[in-house]
Image: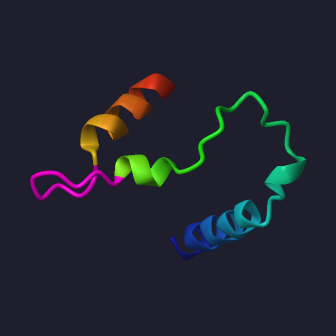
Amino acid sequence: MAAGILQLAINLAKNHHVDCAKLPLSFLPKRENPYGEMLDIKDGVILNETLILSMIKDLL
C-alpha cells in the first residue's frame, strides 16, 4: 500500500510540473472564471450543483 501511495504522489507531482502553455489545447473552450459560475449561493447551497452536473454530463 505504501508503494502505491508513493507512486500516486510521484505522478501527482509530475502532473503539477506540466507546462500547459506548450500543449495543443486550442480545442478546449476558454473559461475565464469557471469557479465563479459554480459558486452560486442560493438557499444556503454554496455550489451550483445543477451547473456542475450539467458540465459533467457534457463530458460524457
The residue positioned 68% from the left and 32% from the top of the image is 28
Which of the 4 image quadrants contains residue 11? Answer: bottom right
Q: Is residue 44 magenta?
A: yes
**Image label count:** 0
Q: Residue 6: horizontal and vertical position, in percent?
A: 63, 74
- Residues 36 and 18: in front is 36
- Residues 4 and 38: in front is 38
Question: In the displayed structure, would residue 45 be above or below residue 1?
Answer: above
Asked whether, in this view, residue 16 is left or right of residue 8, the answer is right
- Residues 32 and 28: in front is 32
Question: In the displayed structure, would residue 41 be above or below residue 5?
Answer: above
Q: How is the image coloured?
A: rainbow
The residue positioned 16% from the left and 51% from the top of the image is 42
Asked whether, in this view, residue 3 is left or right of residue 57, the answer is right
Q: Residue 51: horizontal and vertical position, in percent?
A: 33, 36
Q: Is residue 56 magenta?
A: no
The residue positioned 71% from the left and 65% from the top of the image is 16
The residue positioned 12% from the left and 59% from the top of the image is 44
Q: Residue 4: horizontal and vertical position, in percent?
A: 58, 66
Residue that protrudes farthest toward the left in the picture: 43
Q: Dominant secondary structure of the magenta stretch?
A: loop
Asked whether, in this view, residue 59 is left or right of residue 16, the answer is left
Asked whether, in this view, residue 35 is left or right of residue 51, the answer is right
Residue that protrudes farthest toward the right in the picture: 22
- Residues 37 and 56: in front is 37
Q: Kindly tell me whether residue 60 is visible in this rendering.
A: no
Q: Kindly tell me whether residue 14 is visible in this rendering.
A: yes
Magenta part of the protein: which range? Answer: 39-47
